[in-house]
Amino acid sequence: MTKYDKYGALHVNAKGKLVDRNGVTVTLHGFSTHGLSWYPQYVNRDFFSFMSEKWHVDVIRLALYTAEKDGYCVGDEANKERLLEVIDRGVKAATEVGLYVVIDWHILSDSNPLIYKDEAVKFFDLMASKYHAYGNVFYEICNEPNKDCTWKDIKSYAEEVIPVIRKHDKYAVILCGTPKWSQEVDQAAADPITIDDNLMYVLHFYADSHRDKLRNKFEEAAKGGLPLFITEFGCCDAGGDLANNFEQAGSWIELADKYDVSYIMWNIANRDESSASFVPHCDKTTDFTDEDLNEACRWYLKVLKDHAS
Ligand code: IDC
């Protein structure tokens, strides 16, 4: 039985928890792709099926960069078409193997989602019109607002994008990033979005950089009933490439589990960086064995295995 067969379409309940079709609390665990322009080869059905069966993964995040490296908003029309095809392949592959899938509007160097708001409106209009009947799709409307982008900016962006999604898709869970690279969930808690209640706020952590201070912020918000989803984390530093800190990462996992918060690890690629799952010389796109995997990936697979048993 696939994860989707088991839980069906998910939603957020009045206590801020993600629940299944019977109202039972669910937590999802999985991986994020690296940028879809960089590494489209990992978006394939065989690998998704492998992750589901061998790695106990139940969610895949498709990271669509908006600005970096042939990003969706900076390339030409042909580039856009290519990226839309990769997303379509990813959503369909996830659906066929019964995984949940997050469509991630991956803002980063474009620090404020208002910069490409018009593109985002068109993009989510298209996504929701295509995938509204799927039931396993999450829409993540802005990865990591940063620099001087305020919660007020994000909220006004969300208030424009959410109705566009809801025009087509009444039920999907929408995920919204928070200020300072998706860390300041306290600001969202103080002034939540009220136009929609099937919504979760995003927190990201990189375990060696973000420790007790951010965990306290997370815990306050979780205790207060704010719906939270960790759509991206790493065991290393926020740059994604220095040493892993599994002690700190373990504290994060424990805390997320305590509050039934779902989490997704960055990243699926063989890039030469510690946050990448695969070693650089591995060019497989499925059927990975231990020696193909970097340390952080091996550590996470143990976490997933423990969860499954
Ligand atoms: C990093 C990638 C790296 C890439 C860089 C710039 O790992 O290969 O060169 O982006 O595009 C985030 C971001 C995520 C970052 C990651 C690590 O969401 O895009 O990926 N990170 O720096 N937030 C905190 C860390």
Image: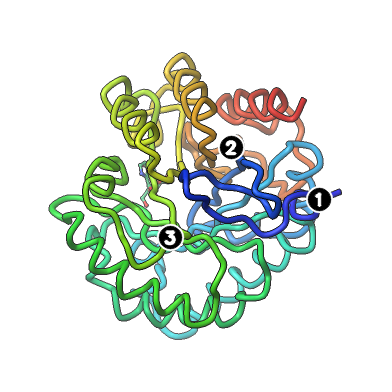
Q: Secondary structure at mark 1?
A: loop
Amino acid on which disc 3 is placed: Asp
Percent position of residue 239, x then y: 33, 37
Residue identified by numbered label 3: 197
Amino acid on which disc 1 is placed: Thr
Residue 2 marker:
1
Quarter of the image where one finds residue 180? top left
Q: Residues within 10 Å of mark 3 (few under 14, many from 20)?
A: some
Mark 1 vs 3: CB contact within 8 A: no
Percent position of residue 11, x then y: 57, 56
Say how the picture is coloured.
Answer: rainbow
Mark 3 vs 2: CB contact within 8 A: no
- State the residue in front, 246 or 193: 193
Q: Residue furthest front?
A: 14
Q: Residues within 10 Å of mark 2 (few under 14, many from 20)?
A: many
Eyeballing the image, is 176 above or below 304? Answer: below
User: Is 107 situated left or right of 1 in this image?
Assistant: left
Residue 277 marker:
2
Percent position of residue 184, x then y: 25, 42
Eyeballing the image, is 288 above or below 160? Answer: above
Q: How far separated are the C-alphas under marks 1 and 3? A: 27 Å
Q: How far separated are the C-alphas under marks 2 and 1? A: 24 Å
- Which quadrant is the C terminus positioned in? top right
Residue name at image x 38 percent, y 56 percent: 176
Q: Residue furthest top?
A: 247
Q: Secondary structure at mark 3?
A: loop
**Mark 1 or mark 3: whose residue is earlier in sequence:** 1
Residue name at image x 28 percent, y 73 percent: 116
Residue name at image x 55 percent, y 58 percent: 102
